[in-house]
Amino acid sequence: MESAAGTPAPPAGRRWFFAWIGLAGLLLGTCLAGPHALVAVEQERRYMVAFANLTEEPGATLEGTGFTGREVRESFVLAVRRYPIDLVFYDNHRDSRTALANAEDAVQRKVDLYIQYLDDPATNVKIGQSLRAAGIRSLAINTPVPGAPLYTLDNRAAGRIAGEALSEYGAKNWRGLPTIGVIVGNLRAQEHRIPDRVQGASEGLKRHLPALKITPLETQGNPALVGPLLAKVLATQPATKVLIAAMDDASALAAKSALESAGRLADGAVVGQGVDRSVHGGMNDRKEIDPSNRGSIVIGSVAFYLDRYGYEILPIAMRMLRSETVAPRTVTPHRLITAANVFIEYPPYDMN
């Protein structure tokens, strides 16, 4: 009998001897390596995780920002490479029946964990019940699933960050000058919880300017209405400084254009919400938030990081899969992104 290498095989007794020596060496090495070696062996098991996205309809944006479902999905595709996870993707299409069918399919597949992103509380209750009955753990995004840990943005905190930045800017640069506040965007969009964002912005605007008068401008989600609405305000306030809290980046850019058209750039300061590519872009894009554009009246935007959800959510999923303790609620770390820190938070995506 010959080995695979073609050389004579040792006698049977010697083969058993060498086998025992090899096994003893393996056990000794594992013991010397400590418990981490045993954990590493356990972690070689792969898990099947389902991610049911809110919607991947082309052009449809999420959470009152400029981000799309496809960007959220791509973040999961990139982030999962560091984990022993096989992802199964579903598109909920913002539809109750589709979401229920997706969850049923995941139950049939016997996934280890279901990540649910749907802004329909009633449907989430039904899906949570179905998953629990099948013994499948769940993790919710932005809208709760009863009994499941929740990863969520904080609209009120995000609005407050923007308002405080504007209030501080006005107090520092326009002290003693007549100043008003404007909140512009889709202000009553309950499905995106924008009223919370509006409330936070109002609170923040008064942080350093408690007597500030605030004017709401409702666009119903149409940035094209920002110009006409803001033009009317500017016409009635010819010698007034204007602090503009926009509820999304598209509205922030439209507000800047309206001030420019009115010849009032020097009278305005704008902060947006989202930090999508429309304001930070790539190396060759026209960017409002950029170290080389520090004179822009769009002084910043509050980050929502929807394009990094995979990197934020999959570590929570791994802790659940390993039966570790997970916080019942984890909040997006909203930050004000300005020309001073944009390359730290969002390096140009086509740089090098």
Image: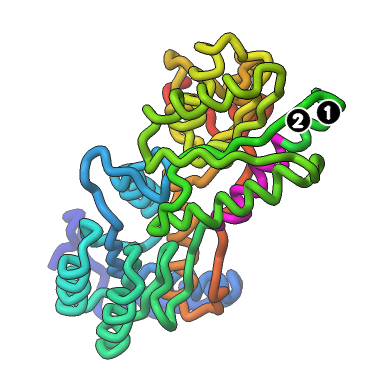
Residue 169 tag number: 2
Determine whether the residue tagged by mark 2 lies in a helix, strand or loop. Answer: helix
Q: Secondary structure at mark 1?
A: helix
- Colouring mode (rainbow / by chain / secondary structure / one colour): rainbow
Q: Residue furthest bottom?
A: 133
Q: Would you say residue 1 sits in the magenta stretch? A: no
Looking at the picture, does residue 290 appear above or below residue 161? above
Q: Residue at (71%, 37%) from the top-left corner? A: 165
- For image coordinates 63% across by 47% down, the residue present is 201
Q: Which residue appears farthest toward the right when viewing the image?
A: 176
Question: Which residue lies under the disc numbered 1?
Answer: 172
Q: Judge whether residue 312 can be spotted in this image.
A: yes
Q: Is residue 200 above or below residue 46?
A: above
Indicate the quadrant containing the N terminus: top left, top right, bottom left or bottom right: bottom left
Q: Nearer the viewer, residue 338 or 216?
A: 216
Range shown magenta? 154-166
Instruction: Residue at 56% x, 61% y: name it.
Output: 331
